[in-house]
Image (tube, rainbow, N blue to C red):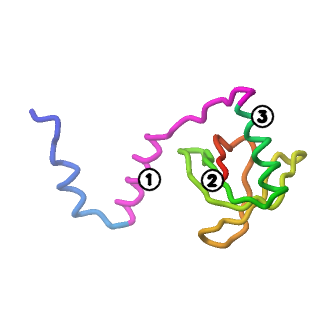
Amino acid sequence: MDSRDRGTIKWTSLMLPEHVEMIKKVWKEDERVEKGMLDEQKAVEIDFILQRAVHDQLTVDLSVHNGFDYESWRVKITAVDKRARKIKALDLRAKDPVEFLLDDIADIAIV
């Protein structure tokens, strides 16, 4: 028997769009990417770039782990709260304020 059964395809036409979306979300969760640990040198580099971005009001590209995968953000850092371990920034695409946990930042680059 062929392992590429059309069973799912046949049933998809009988499903409501909401069910199809729920199934896609479940499949997406199966593709979850685990967050890696940063070495000390990378953490120091991220801290240095964050401080420079705040001081000089620079635009940066962030790679942030969202619990499932990594997302890219182009932001302007407005504040770094080391006590709460968060950064506050302005999303340059949507022009909205956003916050990220320092522990979720995987990479940063000045644009």
Q: Quadrant of the C terminus?
A: bottom right
Q: Which mark is residue 95?
A: none
- Disc 1 to disc 2, how far (Cα)? 27 Å
Q: Which mark is residue 44?
A: 3
Q: Is residue 93 left or right of residue 33?
A: right
* Mark 3 closeness class: few <14, some 14–19, many ≥20 residues within 10 Å: few
Residue drawn 82% across the image and 45% down it: 85
Which residue matches tag 1? 25
Mark nearer the N terminus (1 vs 2): 1
Q: Amino acid at mark 3?
A: Val
Label 1 residue SS: helix
- Disc 3 to disc 2, how far (Cα)? 17 Å
Foreground of the two, 86 or 11: 86
Q: Which secondary structure type mostly characterizes the magenta part of the structure? A: helix
Residue drawn 53% across the image and 45% down it: 69
Q: Is residue 9 left or right of residue 96?
A: left
Q: Which residues are magenta?
A: 18-41
